Image (tube, rainbow, N blue to C red):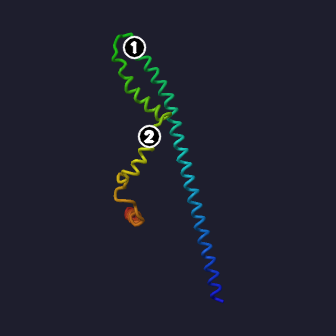
Amino acid sequence: MGFLLSKSLDANMKKQQEFMLHNTRLQMERQILMQNQMRERQMAMQIAWSREFVKYYGTFFTVAAVGLSAGAIRRKKPFLIAPLIPLGFVLTYQMDSAYGTLIHRMRGEAENILTSECDRLDMPHGIPTFESIEKARRAKSSLASFLEK
């Protein structure tokens, strides 16, 4: 009798473990999908911000270019156009960021770093462990209790 009951409990426990594993896997998949959607939304906001910035900066650049060009022609001083060079670089970068392929080039470079230069990504003192975090927590809590006295 006890053997049958034990066998039944083992089968139920195995089903329970499979159910828990399935739920854990499902929860992890949902969490990954949620994090990816949040990342996509943040990227979309950054691109939208870049596009909005280009509108304002493009307007500023156009007004500055017209004004500086008119001043250079009127005063016959071509060096007045010189500020347009760095301003043009900034506008080009922003246009590439907002509408160009900058994000694709950055992603490619990031993938290259992850595959061939992964040693640059190591954290100082390695990955934090439970023991190191617990040690820091205890040191802080003992310091706080010492300061209260």
Local packing at callout 2 (Cα closer than 10 Å; few below 14, some 14-19, many 20+) is few
Asked if 127 appears above or below 89 in the picture, the reply is: below
Q: Locate residue 92: give its quadrant.
A: top left
Q: How far across and how far down the image is residue 66, in percent?
A: 44, 17
Q: How far across and how far down the image is residue 30, in percent?
A: 58, 56
Q: Is residue 5 left or right of residue 144?
A: right
Q: CA distance from mark 1 to mark 2?
A: 39 Å
Q: Locate residue 15: give its quadrant.
A: bottom right
- Residue behind mark 1: 71
Q: How far across and how far down the image is residue 80, in percent?
A: 36, 17
Q: How far across and how far down the image is residue 2, in percent?
A: 63, 88
Asked if 43 appears above or below 30 in the picture, the reply is: above
| Residue type marked 2 | Arg
Residue at 55% x, 48% y is 38
| Residue type marked 1 | Gly
Secondary structure state at the residue bearing disc 1: helix
User: Which image quadrant: the C terminus?
Assistant: bottom left
Secondary structure state at the residue bearing disc 2: helix
Mark closer to the observer (1, 2):
2
Which mark, residue 105?
A: 2
Residue at 37% x, 14% y is 72
Pick whichever, 114 or 63, lies toward us. 114
Local packing at callout 1 (Cα closer than 10 Å; few below 14, some 14-19, many 20+) is some
Asked if 92 appears above or below 4 in the picture, the reply is: above
Asked if 61 appears above or below 25 in the picture, the reply is: above
Residue at 40% x, 29% y is 89
